Image (cartoon, helix red, strand yellow):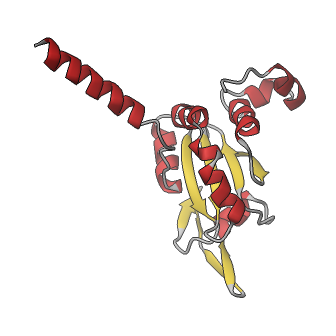
Amino acid sequence: MKKIILVAVLTFISLGVKAQDKVNWLSFEEAMEMSEKEPKPILVDIYTDWCGWCKKMDKTTYKNKVIIEYINTHYYPVKLNGEAKHDITFQGKTFKYQAQGRRGYHQLAAAIMKGQLSYPSTAFFNTERQLLQNVPGYLEEKRFEKILAYFNKDNYKNTPWKEFEKNFKSAM
């Protein structure tokens, strides 16, 4: 009997650990729907298939255990291809793929980035699903951890970035 209980406990623990070995990415629509039902900030990773820095961020920053746990706990994380070809409806407007030369762009990605198509970009939405800020470029783990904490729990409302950054205590 003790062996059965021990095996069950170890299995449960390993399943819990397994659940935090990667970011639990959602579609944009799924995140918005979930945030409406149970409010939580939304993080949007805007990437393209050809972007080397996007791939590097996936292999480094988004593989860091502290980052994974923080994102999965505090955010609804979204992977948004900046060149996606499917329509996305957000705030009553339908955003589409816009062909442009050999490559095109998704109108939602362009709107989030205010027309400055720079990949990767990380956008933060508050619990009311309003865009707070887009942070363009590759973000290494330690800097990203600070940014994640800043846009969580309304820290951005109460504390200037310089002060927040100076007092931030890393979990890494």
Q: Is residue 146 left or right of residue 36?
A: right
As drawn, 37 above or below 49: above
Q: Nearer the viewer, residue 130 or 167?
A: 167
**Quadrant location of the N terminus?**
top left
Estimate the x, y position of residue 43 in percent, counting from the top left: 62, 45
What residue do we see at 69% from left, 87% from top? 102
Is residue 69 at least partly visible in the picture?
yes
Residue farthest to the front? 3
What residue do we see at 50% from left, 41% from top? 36
**Quadrant location of the C terminus?**
top right
Q: Is residue 144 left or right of residue 84?
A: right
Q: Nearer the viewer, residue 167 or 7?
A: 7
As drawn, 16 above or below 92: above
Residue farthest to the left? 1
What residue do we see at 70% from left, 50% from top? 122
Residue farthest to the top? 2
As drawn, 150 above or below 7: below
Estimate the x, y position of residue 87 in percent, counting from the top left: 53, 70
Estimate the x, y position of residue 163 in percent, counting from the top left: 88, 23
Is residue 92 at least partly visible in the picture?
no
As drawn, 8 above or below 80: above
